[in-house]
Image: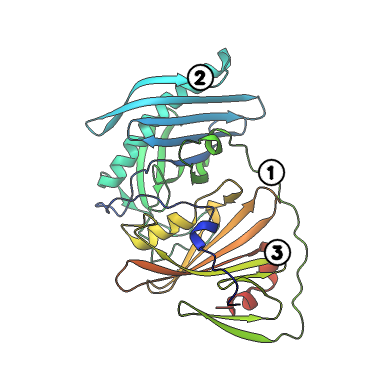
Amino acid sequence: MKSCKRLVLSLLLTVCASGLVPAFAAGPVFGPASGEFVVYRDRSWKAPTWIGFLCYDANTWGAFVKTPSTGSDVSVLFRTEEVDGELVLTGQQIISDITERDVSAVNYLMGLLPDLYKWHQEARAGRGAKQAKAASSDAGIGRSVLLPPLVVLERSSESFGGALELVFAAEVPVFSLRSASVPKAGTIFSLEKAGRVTTGDDRDFFGFTPRSACKDATPFTLAETRTVRQYSIDGLILNLDDQWTALADNTFMLGNTAVLIADTIDLTAAGVSGDLPSALVRLFSSSGKASWILPEYTAVRGTPERMVIENRVFDVNSQLVNRDIKVCLPSGDGTSCRIISLTVSDAAWAGNESYFNSLF
């Protein structure tokens, strides 16, 4: 193994760090960072529709409305300025081909962007905010005590037809908005995808298409007889059997089923600051070009000294769902974090969870 090169975890991640700001009164609800985007499923439309917002900088935004069944695909750039805590639109440029029927979509974005910004500012300041009554996510996974409580605002919105309950989570980029619901219809606006574009390339955002159906994974069967070998990497102990192949001093493959990497990241270099658990969740739950984090399944457990972040990830190329596990062990001085990263087929994980948990 001495001849193997060490792979750096940060180079293999399909996610990017987010610049964060300090916590506010009602709980840590962070501001947007340049390049961050969010996409929401908007059920206030008759046909399945997705709404997206991209923050270029404090005064420049990208937005879209996509309704695939009708062929409507509206993309707009907005110039803005903040006046007394509210976002004022100072200019716009429609960058997609539109027809007369798409004018309402442009108007919708013109009204929704300032509203989202205002609600976000109010949540950050704690104006009229309260903690969520329930701690469960949409998938029924309890919210970890490591994360700040969800923040709830009750507002009225013409865009959504009246009374609206907004749920904010510190780990969600841009507006920190996780979902919005109305009294009779329930959840009407929910986070579908979040990520960060690379500098000078916004195609990952404007090129959004709804997620395709998942394919079935190849079945995985553990060998009945296995010889376990212990590895120590940066003080991290891995218990790997002879089914695993070393690709580098810190990287191991289990056929086409799983990959495991152990590494240490510099938190400052990664842009991680503020509330550390929230920042790490935000870092490791950001979608990339070929990977789509399913936000409703994000789960956090453990302790501040050993935090586990678990995501389900849709692989765009293979159309398979993988389970992504990040075991995070921050240094005492908060400057670095040792990471064990396991990505495994969701089908293989489901039948062998105890085996994979025994690896580290």
Q: Which numbered dot is residue 212?
A: 1
Q: Marks 3/1: CA distance?
A: 18 Å
Residue lying at 75% horizontally and 59% vertically, measured from the top left: 217
Q: Which numbered dot is residue 347?
A: 3
Residue 323 versus residue 230: which sits nearer the camera? 230
Percent x, y of residue 264: 44, 68
Side (left or right) of 25 relative to 205: left
Residue 112 versus residue 173: which sits nearer the camera? 173
Sequence-wise first label, 3 or 1: 1
Q: Which color mode does the image show?
A: rainbow
Q: Which numbered dot is residue 195?
A: none
Sequence-wise first label, 2 or 1: 2
Residue lying at 37% horizontally and 20% vertically, measured from the top left: 91
Residue lying at 50% horizontally and 51% vertically, measured from the top left: 286
Identity, as a three-letter code, of the amino acid under mark 2: Ser
Residue designated by label 2: 104
Tell us which disc is closer to us: 2 or 1: 1
Identity, as a three-letter code, of the amino acid under mark 1: Ser
Above or below 356: residue 259: above
- Secondary structure state at the residue bearing disc 1: loop
- Secondary structure state at the residue bearing disc 2: helix
Residue furthest to the left in view is: 84
Q: Marks 2/1: CA distance?
A: 27 Å
Identity, as a three-letter code, of the amino acid under mark 3: Ala
Quick one: label 3, few (<14), some, or many (20+) residues within 10 Å? some
Above or below 149: residue 73: above
Tell us which disc is closer to us: 2 or 3: 3
Side (left or right) of 210 relative to 341: right
Residue 94 versus residue 103: which sits nearer the camera? 94
Side (left or right) of 156 relative to 340: left
> What is the quadrant of residue 243 in the picture?
bottom right
